[in-house]
Image (cartoon, grey):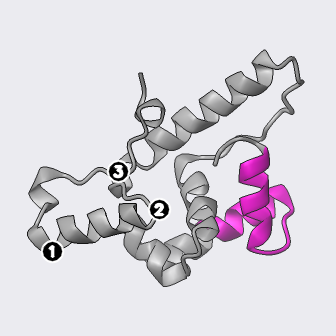
Amino acid sequence: MTLVEYGVRAILWRHQATPRRLLRVVRSVARGAGHLPPDLISRPLTQVGRLRRSAVTSASVAVAPTTGMAPREVDVPRLIAEGLDTRQMSEKLACSERAVKNVLYALMTRLHLRNRAHPVAYALREGYI
């Protein structure tokens, strides 16, 4: 079984589990959000994508070919979908705001997308989020 199939909503590393941070994560999950350390974000997203693709394939629907997205390219549209701004995404991904903007720009350029909503729609349509 995978994290997604078990319904895991949050993971907090033991060395990061201060009382304040633990309380913040529990409240976040109670509001319907989730929390994953940046180094684990790509794993459940990959699992969700795999589950979605297998569901589509098992329903005898043709799966459209994808150009592929790197793990960080999946993280940025997912966080945009959650309503985070560039600064919040950089904090969550433990990188600079410039790095977030570069990932978004590269993704939008490669896929010929026009605004911040398009990468979210693309990632949803292709089963990445």
Q: Nearer the viewer, residue 78 or 29?
A: 29
What mark, if any, has residue 39 been given in the picture?
A: 3
Q: Quadrant of the rendered structure where residue 95 is?
A: bottom left
The answer to whether the residues at label 3 and label 1 have Cβ atoms under 8 Å apart is no
Q: Point out residue 11 in the picture as x, y percentages from the top left corner.
A: 29, 50
Q: Is residue 113 magenta?
A: yes
Q: CA distance from mark 2 to mark 3?
A: 21 Å
Mark 3 surroundings: few (<14), some (14-19) or many (≥20) residues within 10 A? few
Residue ID for mark 1: 20
What mark, if any, has residue 32 been given in the picture?
A: 2
Predominant secondary structure, magenta span: helix
Quarter holding the N terminus? top left
Front of the two marks 2 and 1: 2
Residue 19 in the figure: left or right of residue 96: left
Secondary structure, mark 2, is loop
Q: Is residue 98 above or below residue 67?
A: below
The amino acid on which the numbered mark 1 sits, given as a three-letter code, is Arg
Q: Is residue 111 above or below residue 101?
A: above
Q: Point out residue 59 in the picture as x, y percentages from the top left corner.
A: 82, 20
**Residue stretch in magenta:** 103-125
